[in-house]
Amino acid sequence: MFIVLGATGYLGSNFVKYLQKEGGNVCGLSRAESEYTNVDTLISILQSKKPDFLINAAGFTGKPNVDACELAKAECLKGNAVLPGVIREVCEDLRIPWGHVSSGCIYSGRRADGEGWTEEDEPNFSFRDGPCSFYSGTKALGEEVLAGAENCFVWRLRIPFNEEISPRNYIQKLVNYDSLLEAENSVSHLDEFVEKCVDCFEKDIEPGVYNMTNQGPVTTRQVTEWMIEEGVTDKGFKFFENEEQFMQKAAKTPRSNCVLDTSKAEKAGIGMRPVEEAMRDSMRKMAKEVMV
């Protein structure tokens, strides 16, 4: 049995849907149903359900974006830094393997040598090496809490996308924004991300930290060009002149734009498709939905 925490959220609901489609026995839990952030409550749940694997897709991201985390710091800290520690304590006591959805937003840019950030690199977009958003700071703390955890996967997601019409989908976000910031990023196809995370348990992959993004970086302009070419939109996209203008007009807190190295995941057999292939495939499917 799989247990998914945060089962009604954007990520958690996709884990539940995938596991159900694959015929897996899955129990999805939301905080509205159970206060699993409490140690005793979580112990009781896991002793009762006896899961083979737990997936923590719970956390606090802020809506509509990470700017909202600046106004809800206590909730953000609890969801992203405290909760992982609670789950670690309980899962290690009960000897339950598990996975935690983290974020690549703990980095900015590329490494000094021009390469993408690896799983071994210290975050450079965190409370210890700022300035950063409060969201990124708490996600970095969450990884610190899990350092050396037993039978634990830490999956770093970045800017999820797929073909679904959703305000959380990166492709849809670009259509909705009036102006865009030109930036280079690693991104994650949501369905691939979910599949490869589940594979970690089913294929007996070695536990640890994994950058779970598609192969290769992409720029905002490349994505918008592909969107037009694949028929998602004929919108004439506008761009901010620079990051300073973006911060003045559209954001309240700094944003992470970064490139992650995916060679560890690829060597482990859980690598994802090249980014252009994954994005164009999603866009073609999305365009069909838009035209219906």
Image: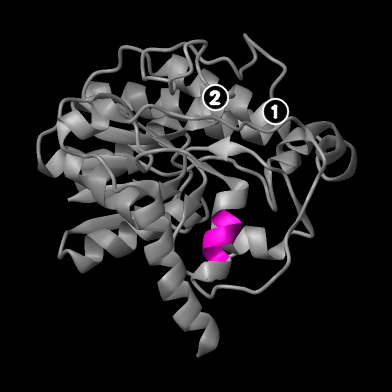
For residue 134, above or below residue 20: above
Q: Is residue 231 above or below residue 99?
A: below
Vertical relation: 93 (above or below) 58: above
State the extent of the magenta-drawn residues as a range.
223-227
N-terminal-most mark, 2 or 1: 2
Q: Is residue 280 magenta?
A: no
Snapshot quadrant of residue 163: bottom left
Amino acid at dot 2: Ile
Q: Residue at x 48, y 81 (%)?
A: 289
* Residue drawn where x is 62% and y is 50% of the image: 221
Say few, some or many: other residues with alpha carbon within 10 Å of mark 2 (under 14 / 14 to 19 / 20 or more): many
Q: Which mark is residue 38?
A: none
Residue situated in front as seen by the camera: 54 or 182 = 182
Residue, disc 2: 106
Q: Residue at x 86, y 38 (%)?
A: 245
In the image, taking residue 80 as reference, residue 173 lies left or right, namely right
Amino acid type shown at disc 1:
Ser
Q: Nearer the viewer, residue 95 or 172?
A: 172
Q: How many marks?
A: 2
Query: Residue 224: within the magenta?
Result: yes
Q: Say left or right for 168 vs 147.
A: right
Instruction: Name the disc covering residue 133, or none.
Output: 1
Q: Assess whether mark 1 and mark 2 are in contact (beta carbons under 8 angstroms).
A: no
